[in-house]
Amino acid sequence: MELSKGQKIPLNENFLTIKFERPDSALEIDTAAFMTGGGGKVAGDEDFVFYGNARHNSGSVTHNDDDSIDVDLSRVPRHVEKISLTATIYDADKRRQNFSMIRNARLKIFGTNGEIAIFPLEDFTVETAIVLGEIYRYKGAWKFNATGAGFSGGLAALCNNFGIEVKDAQPPAPPPPEPPRPKIDTNRNRSSSRREKITIPPPPTVREEPPQPKKVELRKGQKISLVKRGSTLGEIVINLNWSQPTKPTGGFFSRFTGRSGIDLDLACLFELKDGSIGAVQALGNHFGELDYPPYIALDGDDRTGSVAAGETIRVNGKFADRIKRILIYTFIYEGAANWEEAKGVVTVNCPGSPELIVRMDEYGSRKHTCAIALLENVGGTFSVEKVVEFFDDSEQMDRAFDWGLRWTIGHKD
């Protein structure tokens, strides 16, 4: 079975072997497994299995010399709800390497009787770490989620996200001693016509770290995780901007609306870790709250598309561990459903991360609602995936993403 990103399958065997393959790459890759509880954190360092801690004390997870990982689901401790399987590039920043340099990578899952599934891993850009997939408990059974979420920061960032404090393996080396100064003969005896040439060594060259790209434009289905600096994320700012038609659309319906512009509204569905669900949108005056649940707020409502700043949703990164997922969407409240003329662009900004750009570049649909991007909590940060999928209305979109809200017709004041 070939899996796609976000696809979930049941695991009907207890003993599994997970292999990360990259046939055409010489990059030095390290795999690891984080065994976490319900809060997405490890209970202790022993729940981090990697080359330096090759076997969990329960015997349930083993890291092999070939970087494959064996999992015995029958021996997983009760406090473990999820096993996150990861890959990182060794010394990526110093070597100026990232996962865009790897082609044809794939994750393979083997059971007792052979290969169970294969998950192609592609479309990475600046990432130096990947959450390959997750083995998790669901109603007493085990399932696998094909995650494929990448982010910057390497192994240290992964450890911090899963609750492990990373310390330097050894103290930094002392600075090299100053080179001895050349001795100059101060004797004024000029009888010798030959003078010694004195060479002063140049200062040591400081190696610059590779610059991070300032912007990354996502392709459909591509996921990039936001960079978490310190214990929490910064404020996540999601902005929608669009254009108005260059000429009046007119037509039969314009006589009833009395306007030819497009009123494009930014909104989101949210699901918190405690099971709470809802929507943040101008329709119905559900503008949300930043410091209280759902920790998401809509700044205002631009009904014309003429406001330079567009419309903005903010997410309080301090409470990211309480948010499970966010679906960013937009709908045309008034005007023709002409997405090509609207030319909608959504940007996602978070301190320490490159600006992520999602263009609504699929046209021809006459439907009024568009799911733009999906943010999912992965190890304490958010992966951002480009969706751009059109629906007749919000209720149809809700069903497609299995949200579970009840919808009624609403109007703006």
Image (cartoon, grey):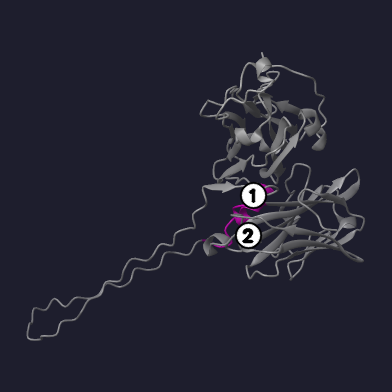
- In the image, residue 200 above or below residue 43: below
Residue 249 seen anywhere in this rendered image of the structure: yes
**Mark with earlier residue (1, 2):** 2
Pick the front one: 309 or 261 = 261
In the image, which residues are magenta? 150-171
Determine if residue 49 is in view.
no
Looking at the rendered image, the quarter that the C terminus falls into is top right
Looking at the image, which is closer to me, 363 or 296?
363
Residue situated furthest front in the rendering: 251
**Residue located beneath label 1 in the image:** 160
Give percent across and percent down for residue 402. 82, 36
Q: Residues within 10 Å of mark 2 (few under 14, many from 20)?
A: many
Amino acid type at mark 2: Phe
Front residue of 172 and 92 = 92
Image location (x, y in percent) of residue 374 = 70, 40
Q: Residue at x 62, y 42 (%)?
A: 358
Residue in the image at 60% along x and 36% along y = 343
Between 15 and 401, the residue placed more toward the observer is 401
Local SS, label 2 = helix
Q: Is residue 202 magenta?
A: no
**Gap between marks 1 and 2, in whole Å?**
20 Å
Q: What kind of residue is marked 1?
A: Asn
* Image quadrant assignment for residue 112: bottom right
Q: Quadrant of residue 108?
A: bottom right
Q: Quadrant of the N terminus?
A: bottom right
Asked if residue 240 is positioned above or below residue 17 in the image, the reply reads: above
- In the image, residue 201 sits, relative to residue 130, either above or below, namely below
Q: Nearer the viewer, mark 1 or mark 2?
A: 2
- Secondary structure state at the residue bearing disc 1: helix
Q: Residue at x 81, y 55 (%)?
A: 3
Task: Provide the residue designation for mark 2.
Answer: 99
